[in-house]
Image: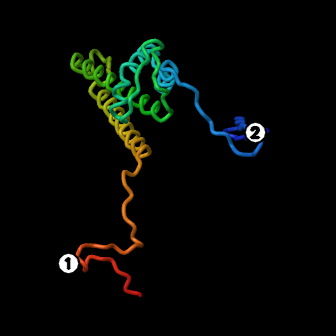
Amino acid sequence: MITTIKIEINSDILRIEDKINTLGKRKKCKIKHMNVATIADEVFRELGEPSSLSISPITFWLRTNIGGLNSYINKSYEIDINTYEVSPQIGINEVAILKQMYIVHYYDVQLRGALVNASTDAVVELESDGSRIRKINKSELGKTWLSYRNSAYDQLISMINSYKLGQSHPVQVAGDDTIEGQYNAGYEYLNRTNNNR
């Protein structure tokens, strides 16, 4: 049985098809193995497909920074030397953190470039014979990149903390407040007693 749900957004109709098994229960949607090139392509598109960047350097960066992901989320992912893919299979939450790590790196690179340009080009505005040329203020551009970087880093830290919280389990569940405690002699005043008997 297949059902179709129509959602109307700005007069565009998107069709979303949900496959439902014969018992009427919804099947869990599993994402197949995400390879590093696919993740790099997603990052490239999320950054707006910048002309100064391509998918290959992103792929290289993602492969070389799996250790950083492991440090952040206490996992042990590796790059398989035969396939150059992440092993064991990486989940969607881990992919989101890895992508955010690259976005922070991208803004760091842009920030460094803006700071280097600001130090070499001190002239902001020229005026001569009634003509005026105004250049982009490189230090202001650096401040903008810093703001983007800090925002992306804050989001990365938030994602990591949420991930760790979601993966945590109680170490110990101790005590039963409904049973009276029994202690050594001399500590009777610490016993929980039911005075309503």
State the residue at coordinates (49%, 27%): 89
Label 1 and label 2: CA atoms lie apart by 72 Å
Quadrant housing residue 172: bottom left
Do labels 1 and 2 touch, CB within 8 Å? no
Q: Position of residue 186 (x, y in %)?
A: 20, 78
Disc number for residue 50: none
With 59 as the anchor, is 190 left or right in this view?
Answer: left
Residue 23 vertical placement versus 60 (above, below):
below
Q: Nearer the viewer, residue 82 or 126?
A: 82
State the residue at coordinates (40%, 23%): 78
Residue assigned mark 2 = 4
Residue 56 vertical placement versus 87 (above, below):
above
Residue assigned mark 1 = 186
Q: Amino acid at mark 2?
A: Thr
Q: Residues within 10 Å of mark 2 (few under 14, many from 20)?
A: few
With 36 as the anchor, is 9 left or right in this view?
Answer: right
Q: Residues within 10 Å of mark 1 (few under 14, many from 20)?
A: few
Residue 12 seen anywhere in this rendered image of the structure: no
Q: Position of residue 56 (x, y in %)?
A: 45, 13
Q: Of the residues tagged 1 and 2, which is closer to the observer?
A: 1
Q: Secondary structure at mark 1?
A: loop
Q: Earlier in the sequence, mark 1 or mark 2?
A: 2
Q: Position of residue 125 (x, y in %)?
A: 27, 21
Residue 100 seen anywhere in this rendered image of the structure: yes
Quadrant housing residue 67: top left
Q: Nearer the viewer, residue 95 or 134?
A: 95
Q: Nearer the viewer, residue 12 or 39?
A: 39
State the residue at coordinates (40%, 46%): 168
Q: Amino acid at mark 1?
A: Gly
